[in-house]
Every structure is written in C-alpha cells, then in structure tokens.
Image (cartoon, rainbow, N blue to C red):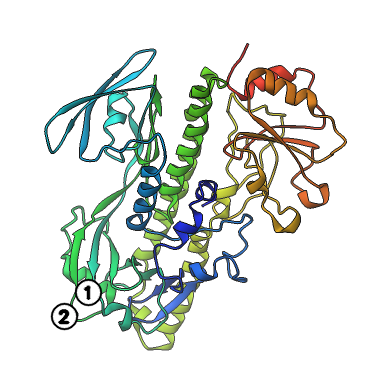
Amino acid sequence: MEIWRRLGLSQVMRNTGLPEDYPNDVAYRTRFVGDEISRIPIPCRRDRYTATGGPDTWWPTPEPPHRINQLFLEPVLFEFAAATPGITILNRTMVDTFHQDSEAVVCEGVNLDSNERLSIRSDFLIGCDGGKSAVRKWIGAKLSGTDVVGRVQSTFFRAPSLIHEQKHPPAWATFSINASRSGNVYAIDGKETWLLHNYLRPDEPEFESVDRDWAIREILGVGPDFKYEVISKEDWVGRRLVADKFREGRAFICGDAAHLWFPMAGYGMNAGIADAMNLSWQLSAYLSGWGGERLLDGYQIERQPITLQVSNFAMNHAYALQAKREKVPENIEYDTPEGAASRERIGRELYDLNVKQYCCGGLNFGYFYDQSPMIAYDGTTHPTYSMDQFTSSTVPGCRTPHVWLENKQSLYDHLGHWFTLLRLDPSLDTSEFELAAQQRGLPLKVLDICPHLAGDAYVHKLVLSRPDQHVAWRGNSIPQNILNLVDQIRGCFQ
C-alpha cells in the first residue's frame, strides 16, 4: 500500500473490494454457519485509519494493510497503466519466443485475433507471466524447493443467501474446523460471491478425490436444499519453489514467475510488488544513465534471499495448519462440556498460530538486504525478525524506519523520488555529499529531521535512503571517500 500511495493509488485501492463496513476479520468456526470458536479482529476499510485496539491497528506507516481480491485490484492497475504516458498495452497478444544481444531484446509474437506476427525490440524484458512463466524457461531458470506442500480443491461460487445463514457477524475469511472436512471460505464481494478452499488430505492425491459438492456442503454446514452456483473451479497445488536465477542478460523474471509458495495472507502478491519496486528503480537508474551495470546484478542478489525466507515462512505455516486440521477431535461439535472445552482450546490455539500470519508487520518491515553490492555496510548485525515482530533499524540494508514529522506528516511522503539523505543535525554541512552526487548524476534530496521526532532507531546523524526505502548508508560525518560511496550505491565501481 505504501507503493500505491507513491503512485497516488492508495485511496483508489481502498475504495474497491469488500464493502467499506464489511469486517476484515478472520473467523474460526466448526462450520461456516456453525459455532464460532475464535476470531482475529481486523478493521473494515472504513475504520482502517482510526481503529484502535486489536492485533492489527498499530501499523507504523500511514498505509496499513488493505484486503482486496485480485478481481478488483487488476482493473485499478490496468486503468492506471493505460492512462500513463509511454505505456502501450497490447491485448490479445502472445509472445512465443525472444532473443537478445548486448544491446537489446527482441520479442516475437502473434496477435491472437488476426494471426498477424509482430516483433518488439526493447532495452529489457521482464517476465511477470506467473507460475507457468515462459520467460523463466527461456532464460534457463530452474525452480527448486518443495514441489508439493498441499493440494487444494478450490471453488469460486455464487450464493446470495449464504451471508444470511451465519449465526455470527461476517468475516473476510472464515475457517471451518471439524472432524469431517475442514476448509476456508473467503468473502469476495461481501454480498454473494465466495471462494472456498477444501484442503485435501495426504491420502487424497487428486483434485477430484473428494466429491466437490459434498465437501462444499460439509465445510459450509448446509443441507441438500441449499442452492449455490459454481462460477469456476480454481484448484491449485501449494508449493515452495524459488528460481535459481532471476536474470539472464537483459531478461528478468518477477513475482510468481520467480517464486511460488503456499498462499498466506497475500504474501505472494506483496513479494511480487516488492520485486517490481526493486527492479524498477534499478532499471530506471540504468536507463537514465547514472546507474551502473552492477545495479542490474543487484536485483537477484537482493530479492532472491528474501523470497527464500518468505517461502519458508509460508511453507512452515502451511504445515502447522495442516497438523491442526488433522487433529480435530470428534467432540468439537458436541453440545457437551467436553465439546465446549475442545472448542475453547482449539480456538485459542488457532488464534495464537494465525494472528502472526494475518498481522504480519515483521515480514513487511523487518526484512533486510545483507549481501548487496550497492549497500555500504558498517559491520553492525541486522536485527532479527519473525512474521509478526521486528525492530526498526537504520543498519544498512534495513527498511528506512518510518517516523511522523511535524503536523503528523509521514516521513515517506517527504522522501525524494530517488535517494534521500536524512540529516538529524542541521548544523552538519552536507555540501560535499551533494556535490559528489551531482558530479555522478545521482539524484539526491537532503531532508532535515528533528532528532526528537526520529526516535530510537535513528542513532546516526546521517542516513541515506534509497528509492525503495531501504537504507544504503549511514554515518555521523561525510566519508572521506565520498565519490567511492556514491559510485557504490549507484552500481558503478571505478
């Protein structure tokens, strides 16, 4: 959402998806229409900026998370791209091969309506073409990891009456936990469309190993008279796979083309957006003339280790959830003291396990780049992080810590489009740094921050923030080899 804010899209995003008053909660029930055993409260989009209390209202930046299905996200991005000067969109066009040399990439393709062949010459090619990426295959990248974490029989369906069948307030995600068939139901439009995941068991190797209609009714807890319409079957295999390379020459891969993992709370989409942000500023700097060849190497060096980390977070969490589903006792639906005790215990366990997944500040703000050739490290160890916990830090490679400036203004709104030198001591002369940046053509903004507003994370007088809001360097004075530093951060080594 911070990236969409920079593009002026955050409010447009927040105005789409579920109705503004629809709870973004995650509920755990014996059946969708059964007894609720726990709930993770997450504010609806109307209350996202003002809600207090709960596990997900402490967000440290002006853009907290937003739950939005890809059905609503993509039209917003498409409209923005179509209105952006310099972007040409070719619909109904398939690229079937490409070749490259030291100067350009040439893609060969066909218009699917006219069968007319076309050839497109460009400086670079970025394959954002999903899990079955053709570009990944063309550049010789291989996926490795865990091929099957789990299989899911998934159904997108329409049922206008379902929202009224519930005994409890609606939720964005509703897990059905029982001994017969456990699953998950996501509200898509908050009215009548739903996505249901039926998690297949280890002895159910095929998507049709289980009768789909039976499983849907078991998970929902409805009888044979309940009516629904299947819109599409969306069956999928959960994996943990990361490509061994993200680049070959002038061709790159991004998002699901580069990494696949078990979908958890939008981690895949967020990682893909972060990939694109990282690669876009590096390519833009190179094409603008002030970025060097090493910037092109930096994309894989920085992003591949992060995707490996997140893929393991997602896989381990998927296995933990599977273990819970396999141990649901028969009495969880009994109207007995033993049944009530089981519901209380399992509800507490599911809350404790999953609140980290859905309120995952650690994955958003704790990750760091620790091997980048474009970051000037100072020997300080990066703070550890988990799914939900992190420590704000200016250790080079970490996310630039957010702070609130005067009049409750966001630091991120005042950062420059490119590099920003944050100065916590206004008496410190930065002209030498600015001159070095000017000599190398590196765009640089100097921004003064009052030390009393900066907080404990800012322990140095100078912090250099990159275009992707990661710390590139920090210090208490201008380094003697300032031109060498500027060359390093822009990917040019003399």
Nearer-the-camera pick, 314 or 47:
47
Picture residue at 30% right of the left edge, 30% below the top: 135
What is the x, y in percent for residue 289?
54, 20
Nearer-the-camera pick, 40 or 52:
52
Q: Residues within 10 Å of mark 2 (few under 14, many from 20)?
A: few
Give the distance between the C-alpha atoms of the residues marked 1 and 2, in whole angstroms: 8 Å
Disc 2 element: loop
* Picture quarter with the C terminus: top right
Disc 1 element: helix
Is residue 456 visible from the viewing direction of this image? yes
What is the x, y in percent for residue 356?
53, 59
Task: Report the residue marked by disc 2.
Answer: 224
Picture residue at 28% right of the left edge, 28% below the top: 137
The type of residue carrying mark 2 is Pro
Precedes in sequence: disc 1 or disc 2: 1
Q: Taking 434 as reference, is 459 above or below it? A: below
CB-based contact (under 8 Å), mark 1 and mark 2:
yes
Task: Report the residue marked by disc 1.
Answer: 217
